Image: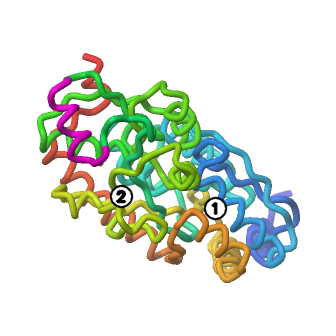
């Protein structure tokens, strides 16, 4: 017996019902967030602080895991292939979309994701061990110029803003130093404290170590000095026209239902007002800042073009070119 036209339409409507109701009922189980950097760094700490406060608005817990391989690109590649059901999210920095693709091939595109929101602008800077002989960035740069290849610096990965800052200095000063990438700022910090690298160009996880006198801060990458160290100038103040404009964000795979994106965005935005979240951000001097899904997407598209232009001007070789 052939199905009638009415029966066919009914079947289509029934098939669509779970999709429509999904956004209304969501979430009905725990939500996974993959942080694209190692545990203990500012991305990890801030994401956990935000998620823990958003849970009460969603009625379900967030399950946080970490994968810091590839400067954050491995985690993005994993989540890009997940089901777009709102239960598989990723917490990356904007560098995974706007910087790293200019340096080397990645297994995803910006179009493979739906940005949900961005919640913070991290601070980063250049630090060395306190027992190092250099008291300023100028002294450090002069040593590197006179000793080609002797200085090693760690970052959270190839293509990160932290590496970009060091390459900018190297290009302007004619320096040859060695980049050592790590799966996150915390492992790079450990390497510096252990004397395995000369310096770290990294996020503000170094703050307590600078305060305790184990490390020395030479320069900030951002557009302002830190409140904790007002005597330390930015790179721009020291003659280097570079600013780290990285943001922390939450995203889902392409196809995540708009109703789900809206519900997540609202819950995460409300969580940003929680005193415990604000305290966690202040401790690391991360500036809370917010863009919704549409504005975050627009920002990423524009930033991709700006960073691409700077990369071309610096003539920074792609990772594949370095191996040839």
Which of labels 1 and 2 is toward the front? 2
In which quadrant of the rendered image does the C terminus lie? Answer: top left
* Residue ID at (24%, 51%): 308
Q: Which mark is residue 220?
A: 2
Left or right: residue 37 versus residue 97 is right
Give the magenta range.
135-147
Q: Is residue 141 magenta?
A: yes
Chain-order first, disc 1 or disc 2: 1
SS under mark 2: strand
Left or right: residue 153 versus residue 143 is right
**Nearer to us in this view, 18 or 233:** 233
Left or right: residue 58 versus residue 132 is right
Query: How crowded is the residue under tag 1: few (<14 C-alpha within 10 Å), some, or many (20+)?
Result: many
Dominant SS type (magenta): helix
Residue 121, percent across and down? 47, 67
Please name the residue that numbered disc 1 is placed on: 46
- Does residue 92 show up? no
Q: Is residue 43 above or below residue 226?
A: above
Residue 227, percent across and down? 46, 71
* Residue ID at (21%, 46%): 138
SS under mark 1: helix
Q: Quadrant of residue 266?
A: bottom right
* Residue ID at (31%, 45%): 135
Q: Quadrant of residue 124?
A: bottom left
Residue 185, percent across and down? 53, 43
**Nearer to us in this view, 100 or 105:** 100
* Residue ID at (54%, 74%): 288
Q: Is residue 49 magenta?
A: no
């Amino acid at each position: 017996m052939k199905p009638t036209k009415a029966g066919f339409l009914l079947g289509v409507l029934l098939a669509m019902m779970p999709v429509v109701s999904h956004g209304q009922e969501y979430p009905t189980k725990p939500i996974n967030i993959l942080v694209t950097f190692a545990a203990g760094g500012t991305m990890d700490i801030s994401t956990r602080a935000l998620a823990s406060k958003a849970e009460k608005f969603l009625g379900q817990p967030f399950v946080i895991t970490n994968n810091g391989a590839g400067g954050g690109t491995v985690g993005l590649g994993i989540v890009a292939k997940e089901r777009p059901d709102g239960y598989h999210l990723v917490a990356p920095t904007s560098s995974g979309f706007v910087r790293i693709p200019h340096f080397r091939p990645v297994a995803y595109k910006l179009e493979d994701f739906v940005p949900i929101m961005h919640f913070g602008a991290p601070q980063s800077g250049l630090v060395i061990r306190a027992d190092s002989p250099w008291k300023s960035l100028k002294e450090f740069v002069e040593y590197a110029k006179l000793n080609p290849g002797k200085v090693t610096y760690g970052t959270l990965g190839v293509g990160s803003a932290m590496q970009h800052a060091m390459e900018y200095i190297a290009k302007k000063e004619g320096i040859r130093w060695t980049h050592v990438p790590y799966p996150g700022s915390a492992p790079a910090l450990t390497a510096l404290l252990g004397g395995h690298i000369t310096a770290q160009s990294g996020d503000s996880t170094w703050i307590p170590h600078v305060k305790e006198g184990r490390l020395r801060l030479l320069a900030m990458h951002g557009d302002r000095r830190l409140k904790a160290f007002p005597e330390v100038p930015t790179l721009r103040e020291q003659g280097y026209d570079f600013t780290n404009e990285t943001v922390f964000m939450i995203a889902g795979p392409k196809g995540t239902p708009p109703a789900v994106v809206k519900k997540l965005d609202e819950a995460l935005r409300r969580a940003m007002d929680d005193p415990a979240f604000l305290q966690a951000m202040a401790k690391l001097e991360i500036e809370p800042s917010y863009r919704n899904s549409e504005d975050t997407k627009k920002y990423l598209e524009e930033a991709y073009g700006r960073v691409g232009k700077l990369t071309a001007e610096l003539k920074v070789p792609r990772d594949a070119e370095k191996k040839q």
